[in-house]
Structure formats: structure tokens, C-alpha cells
Amino acid sequence: MGDRPLESNVSAYSRPTDLKITDLRIVNLRALPFDVTILRLDTNQGISGYGEVRDGASPTYALLLKSRLLGENPCNIDKIFRKIKQFGFHGRQGGGVCGIEMALFDLAGKAHGVPAYQLAGGKFRDKALIYCDTESTTDGAAMGARLKARQDAGFKFLKMDIGIGLLEGIAGAVSAPPGMTETRTIMHPFTGIQITDIGVDYLVEYVRQVRDIIGYEVPLAADHFGHINVESCIRLGQALDPFSLAWYEDMIPWQFSDQWLRLKNSVLTPVCTGEDIYLKEGFMPLLEAEAVSVIHPDLATSGGIMETKKIGDLAADYGVPMAMHMAGSPISFLANIHCAAATENFYVLENHSVDLPWWEDLIDGIEKPLIVDGYAPVPEAPGLGFGDLNEEVIREHIDTRPGRDAGYFEPTEAWDSEWSRDHLWS
């Protein structure tokens, strides 16, 4: 060994106790199929971790947390999460906290040389079942053909939209006050929109045509019913019950536990919600009321890998399985796969980007395709399980709109000293 000190032969990655966060940078992407922000946490030992701010969320939700992260050891995931979780909330407002939590798991896994699922307690499965959403068409037979193509590609769980969006132009199908069918800013109980028997009959025939093509053996979930009231949800749900759908998703806002219980007790199909709920406490009212059949968190809103595992464990105590919503890049996808592997009552995970040929090209250093015969193999490499980003492909899809063009991981010093009195007590 000569005069070289022993320490020179030891990888810096083997000193996780000395690891410190030194920087946070971002790149904004378009069309995955939604806009997302990839964030990167850098450290004093030359390793970086990647996370993702959820589709449709502002990168500011992550950037404002930079000053709270600098100097922290990313291996202290729970400590940091407890420090920053007050800056998240339901819906897209959870995106910053969750994206950082993903990156902490990526960093800690790399520092210790273990996959993220191991940090979450180990795995229950070697692969995760995947379902894919499918773009709608107003013709039931054509929709059936699209879903049959998914089956032929190896997918064993499907989802489609069934709702008032399919009834546009059909006389008498929907009853609504002026302008209410166009708005997306008024919650369902307050719109006054009702689906009529004409509309119900149309959608029943639509689903019948789909089932005639794909058969009844494959699970088929349904989403995007429109901002209709709970009475219309019950009327439509009862009419669709004979088609044995996997679940009715987000028929009404998740906040109304009593209405969910009323819906659940009125239909024979499982009811499902959760993609906009932050933290396990947000799921408690629905679970305590026994108001849902399936929970459906989006890991990029619900709190990240560990918190979503806790949500799954909580739901298991109530006999409820956990499906997972995901509409992001391969980074968020892999974070979900590790969580799915570590959660006993995991059911199925969404991928909203099956039709983007360049989607999985955003990352390198992992075996592809990421989805094989309808399942995603659980990565065994450290952290989230991929090597690095594909800079060329990332740059091709950077969001260059005014206010969103942050470049490719450009410096973010303006956020280094952002400060407020964060204590929640006096």
C-alpha cells in the first residue's frame, strides 16, 4: 500500500454519518403526461439523490424547503420529514415535501448501499402489479379496442373514464345550472349537476360494449365521473354494478366521509379515493367511518415512501387494500415501486405514461423495460434503483414557458437563506 493512508482506499459512500446536504436544484419537465419538477439533492460526498414534485404542482413547494435542508444528514429521513412536513398539505401542496422525501430515500440508500425498500422495512414482493389509464373516446366499441390493446401488451389491470364527459351533445343526458358543466373549481355537492336516466342508460351501454370486447376476467377500474352530486353517483353506480368494475374512483371529494359512507352502502362495487390526501391523518376519517373499499394515495402527495407505507399499514388494520395513483416520471414511479414492495396490503399501481415512448429514457443505469408483462420488477440497486438521469432526453423535454424555465439544474442560491419562525408552538 506504500505511503497512501488507509482512508484513501475507502469509498466516501461508506461514511454516511458524515454525509451532509449541500444543495437543492431542479429541472421542470412538460408532458409526462403532466408537468412535473425533478429535484436533485447534492451532498458533501459527491453523491446525489433525486425526487419529484408532483404533476401540476409548483416547484416553489420544494425550493422554499432548501434552507431547512442545508447541512442536514439525508440519512436522517424521519427527522427531516418531521421538520418539513408542516410545509405540505393536501393536493399538489404536498409535492415539495414528498419530492424531497423521495430524494432522501435515494440518497440514504446510496450511502448505505441498499435499495430504498430495505430502508422501509424490507419487501413483501419482487414485482408490483401495474394498471394503466387509457385515453377516452366517446364510442364504447372503440374504447374496448383500446383497452384490448392494453391486454395484448401484457397489462392485467385496466382503467378508463366513465362520466358526464362522454355525454356532451347527447340531449337530456345531464341536468345542470348554467356554466356548471364547464367549471373545475366548484366541488361536486355545490354544482347542482345531475345525470339523468338518459345519461345513465348511455353509459351503461358504453360499458357493456367495452366489457363485450375485453371480457370480465380482467379488472377494470373507473374514474372521472364528473362533478355530480352523491345522488347521481348512487344512481349511476347502481346501474353499473352488474359490470363488476374494480372500483369507482373519486366519485365525490375525499373530504366528505359521510357521503362516501352513503355511497359505499348504496352500491355493490368497491369505492376508492385518496390521491389528494396528505399524511396518514388525512385518511383516518374515511377509514374510521368504514367509508371506502380501497384507498388510493399518490405518494407524491401523501407524504413520500415511508408515510405512504404507514398509510397502507393503517388501512390494513381496517381490512382495506392500498392501490396507488401515479402520474409522473420514472423517478416517482420507482419511489412507488419501493413503497409497494414494502407494504403488505398493496394492490396495484398506476402508470399514466404508457404511451410515451421516451418516458423511461429519462433515466439510465437500470434494466428496461421498467414494466414487464404487466408488472414492474422491484429494483435491487441502491436508493431508488437507477444510475443517473439521461441529460439529453431531459433537455429535450424541459418546460420553457415563462415562469417555468428553470434550466437544467441551475443554481438556486436565492433559496439558501429563506427563513421564518417555523415552530408550531410559542
Image (tube, rainbow, N blue to C red):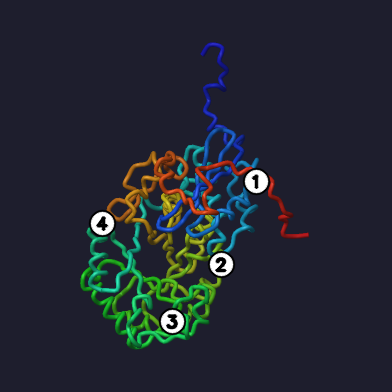
Mark 3 and mark 2 lie on one chain; the one further toward the N terminus is 3
Separation of residues labelled 3 and 4 (CA atoms): 34 Å
Up the image or down, 321 lies above or below 80; here it is: below
Mark 1 and mark 2 lie on one chain; the one further toward the N terminus is 2
Mark 3 and mark 1 lie on one chain; the one further toward the N terminus is 3
Expressed as whole percent of the image width and height from the top left, the position of residue 216 reads 25, 71
Instruction: Classify 10 Å Cα crowding around label 2: few (below 14), some (14-19), many (20 and above).
Output: some
Expressed as whole percent of the image width and height from the top left, the position of residue 273 reads 46, 70
Identify the amino acid type marked 1: Ala
Evaluate whether residue 120 shows in this view.
no
Residue 277 or residue 93, whichever sits in front? 93
Query: How many numbered discs, if any?
Result: 4
Q: Secondary structure at mark 2?
A: helix
Identify the amino acid type marked 2: Gly
Q: In front: mark 3 or mark 1?
A: 1
Q: Quadrant of residue 218?
A: bottom left
Expressed as whole percent of the image width and height from the top left, the position of residue 386 reads 42, 42
In which quadrant will I find the C terminus? bottom right
Q: Residue at x 41, y 60 (%)?
A: 346
Residue 280 or residue 104, whichever sits in front? 104
Separation of residues labelled 1 and 2 (CA atoms): 33 Å
The residue pinned by badge 2 equals 282
Which dot marks residue 154? Answer: 4
Q: Secondary structure at mark 4?
A: loop
Evaluate whether residue 361 shows in this view.
yes
Which dot marks residue 414? Answer: 1
The residue pinned by badge 3 equals 265
